[in-house]
Image (cartoon, helix red, strand yellow):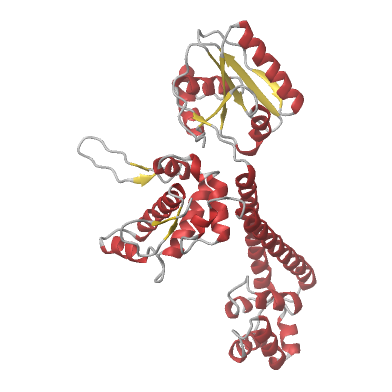
């Protein structure tokens, strides 16, 4: 299997053309440099197919004009705006690399001894970083991994949207029925959404009566809520100090928010179902799912963010991708604290963090290890970060060895699967 993993480019040789692109939403700026220092003035081209064709024509012309054999094309990590250009170039005879925005920012200060930032200066700085060998080769997720990355990112955006709407809903409810938030604290529950949608005001609760309210809460909560909670809500409605002026307009917005929250719930459910479907197409997904505490959605998110676990040969490479690699700042007799770099994929760290929280619970597979660290005086947050690293190491090892996780195994992380 070809291991086209992300790796450091290294210094370019004497037959390599460096092409740098400063990516923008509508307009990109390109720049070419030959090994002997001859270059072209940075030029603008549209972030569309016609612009890409123009860039490629100029690039090939520069290559032939200087008799260069290889081409390295570099970008700064700029999110979605670079993706169309990347997919245009991925099948060309070029090496695609990306630079860290932090490197670009720091080298920009050294260039001309000025913090000046212009569209003409930026691609030159990117080219300088590539020439120094401080760029990483780019791996574009393909197949099921690419689908899982898109689905997990869409799910994360939908959850953020739903959370924002839930916060707006609480603000509006506080105006017309502030006591409701004290009696029904779980705003995401079906019981709360039903009451907010059908009887959001104190007057509607009182008109319903305590018996009918009790029956509704019992049905919507599947027996978790009953007479006691209904009594609390009813008494709160009788004592409510919610406003009455302008209430109709607030109720209109409340209904709109509840409808949108329900739509987001359905969308998230559809995304998760699709994630589970695509996860089955990943040959090593069963290995990750064998880890107690990692469900299908978490496994799908991990594979989507990593791209392909099998393309990494060492765990240190994967730690850097997640931004969980350790560093310290020490000088002379001063010994700095070790911290994680946070220079990798932030959503991957988030997935690992919540997985670690699940695994350090009393019945979790990392509970004993977590308690041991706390017993040594390690702060909780640092112990949880250590557990994130542990989760990633376990996942990497069992995929590498084509094995499954076995709890309380004394000599290995898992048992080898048949080939």
In percent of the image, x 73 and y 68: which residue is there?
A: 258
Q: Determine whether, in the image, residue 311 is placed left or right of residue 338.
A: right
Count how many numbered circles sit on residues in the image. Answer: 0
In percent of the image, x 73 and y 23: which residue is there?
A: 51
Residue 12: x and y, percent? 47, 18
Residue 293: x and y, percent? 47, 64
Residue 136: x and y, percent? 49, 30
Image height of 414 relative to 346, above or below = below
Residue 172, picture quadrant: bottom right
Image height of 231 relative to 97, above or below = below
Residue 360, picture quadrant: bottom left
Q: Determine whether, in the image, residue 48 is placed left or right of residue 328.
A: right
Image height of 34 relative to 124, above or below = above
Most distant residue in the bottom direction: 211
Residue 383, picture quadrant: bottom left
Of residue 94 and residue 404, the one placed in the foreground of this image is 404
Residue 394: x and y, percent? 41, 53
Most distant residue in the left direction: 333
Of residue 227 and residue 236, the one placed in the foreground of this image is 227
In percent of the image, x 74 and y 76: which residue is there?
A: 244
């Amino acid at each position: 299997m070809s291991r086209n993993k992300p790796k450091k480019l290294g210094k370019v040789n004497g037959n390599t053309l460096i092409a740098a692109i400063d990516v923008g939403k509508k307009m990109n700026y390109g720049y070419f440099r030959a090994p002997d220092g001859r270059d072209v003035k940075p030029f603008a081209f549209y972030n569309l197919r016609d612009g890409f064709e123009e860039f490629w024509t100029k690039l090939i012309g520069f290559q032939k004009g200087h008799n260069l054999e290889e081409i390295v094309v570099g970008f700064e990590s700029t999110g979605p705006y670079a993706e169309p250009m990347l997919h245009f170039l991925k099948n060309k005879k070029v090496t695609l690399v990306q630079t860290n925005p932090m490197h670009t920012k720091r080298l920009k200060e050294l260039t001309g001894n000025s913090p000046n930032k212009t569209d003409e200066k930026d691609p030159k700085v990117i080219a300088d970083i590539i020439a120094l060998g401080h760029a990483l080769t780019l791996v574009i997720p393909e197949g099921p991994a690419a689908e899982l990355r898109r689905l997990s990112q869409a799910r994360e955006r939908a959850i953020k949207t739903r959370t924002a709407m839930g916060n707006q809903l609480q603000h509006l409810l506080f105006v017309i029925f502030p006591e409701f938030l004290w009696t029904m604290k779980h705003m995401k529950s079906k019981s709360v959404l039903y009451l907010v949608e059908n009887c959001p005001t104190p007057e509607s609760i009182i008109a319903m009566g305590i018996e009918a309210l009790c029956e509704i809460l019992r049905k919507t909560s599947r027996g978790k809520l009953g007479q006691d909670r209904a009594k609390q809500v009813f008494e709160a409605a009788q004592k409510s100090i919610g406003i009455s002026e302008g209430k109709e307009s607030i109720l209109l917005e409340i209904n709109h928010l509840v409808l949108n929250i329900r739509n987001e719930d359905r969308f998230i459910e559809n995304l998760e179902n699709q994630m589970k479907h695509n996860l089955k197409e990943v040959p090593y997904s069963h290995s990750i799912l064998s880890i107690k505490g990692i469900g299908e959605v978490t496994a799908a998110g991990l594979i989507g963010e990593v791209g392909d676990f099998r393309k990494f040969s060492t765990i240190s490479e994967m730690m850097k991708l997640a931004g969980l690699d350790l560093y310290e700042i020490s000088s002379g007799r001063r010994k700095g604290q070790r911290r994680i770099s946070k220079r990798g994929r932030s959503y991957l760290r988030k997935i690992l963090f919540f997985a670690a929280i699940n695994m350090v619970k009393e019945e979790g597979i990392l509970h004993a290890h977590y308690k041991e660290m706390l017993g040594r005086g390690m702060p909780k947050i640092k112990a949880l970060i250590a557990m994130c690293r542990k989760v990633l190491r376990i996942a990497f090892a069992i995929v590498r060895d084509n094995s499954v996780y076995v709890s309380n195994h004394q000599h290995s992380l898992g048992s080898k699967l048949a080939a």
